[in-house]
Amino acid sequence: MSQDKTETDNSKTKRVSEIYNFKQSTSNYLLLNQVEAIQRRQSNTNIGDRNIVVINQIGDSNIAVSQTNSANSSLEYIQIGDRNTIKSSNSILQTTERLIQNGNDNAITNFSFGNVSNSSLQVLQNGNNLRFEKFGTNSLTENLSFRITGNNQTLIIRSF
């Protein structure tokens, strides 16, 4: 038996890999740029009671739905990728949210209500098919920050 060595043309595979790496580095750059711009806007805002919603979407079929009954709110939603969903409902006197989705098919559901006057939620999803659900707010969960990375993961918080 003899083994023949054959050469394979990998130029197309290399090109696809280059395109993917370019897309990833561009997505990361845009994500950091958006976060820094939002922080600058926040530091330049010295108004009393206000309600601000900033939504940045890059990709296809992204959905952001917000319903807020609040005297003072700052809501920032950034979606980079395809088919990401944010659904948020707040009835807290002062509400701050920064929800960032980088990837595809991610979902964030947040229902903030309870006997607290301030609520802060920061969620960064970096990956695909990630789920975050939060129901309710109390003194233990009024200030939360999560970073969820990888694929096919779910985090559920019930706070009554």
Image: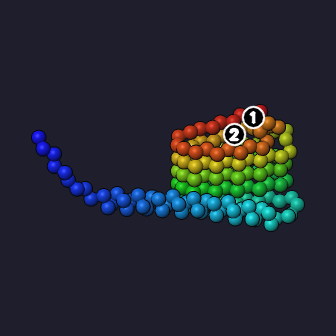
**Residue 67 image position (x, y, % from top left):** 73, 50
Q: Residue at x 86, y 58 (%)?
A: 49
**Earlier along the polypeptide chain: callout 1 or callout 2?**
2
**Residue kind at label 1, given as amino acid type:** Ser
Where residue 159 is drawn, which disc sits there? 1
Q: Residue at x 59, y 38 (%)?
A: 154
Give the tally of numbered discs: 2
Mark 2 = which residue? 134
**Residue kind at label 2, given as amino acid type:** Lys
Q: Of residues 73 and 139, which is closer to you in this image?
A: 139
Point out the residue furthest to the left here.
1
Placement of 45 over or under 7, stated as above or below = below
Quadrant the N terminus occupies: top left
Quadrant the C terminus occupies: top right
Callout 1: helix, strand or loop? loop
**Residue 93 image position (x, y, % from top left):** 84, 48
Point out the residue furthest to the front here.
2
Q: Residue at x 47, y 59 (%)?
A: 21
Q: Of residues 148 and 79, which is closer to you in this image?
A: 148
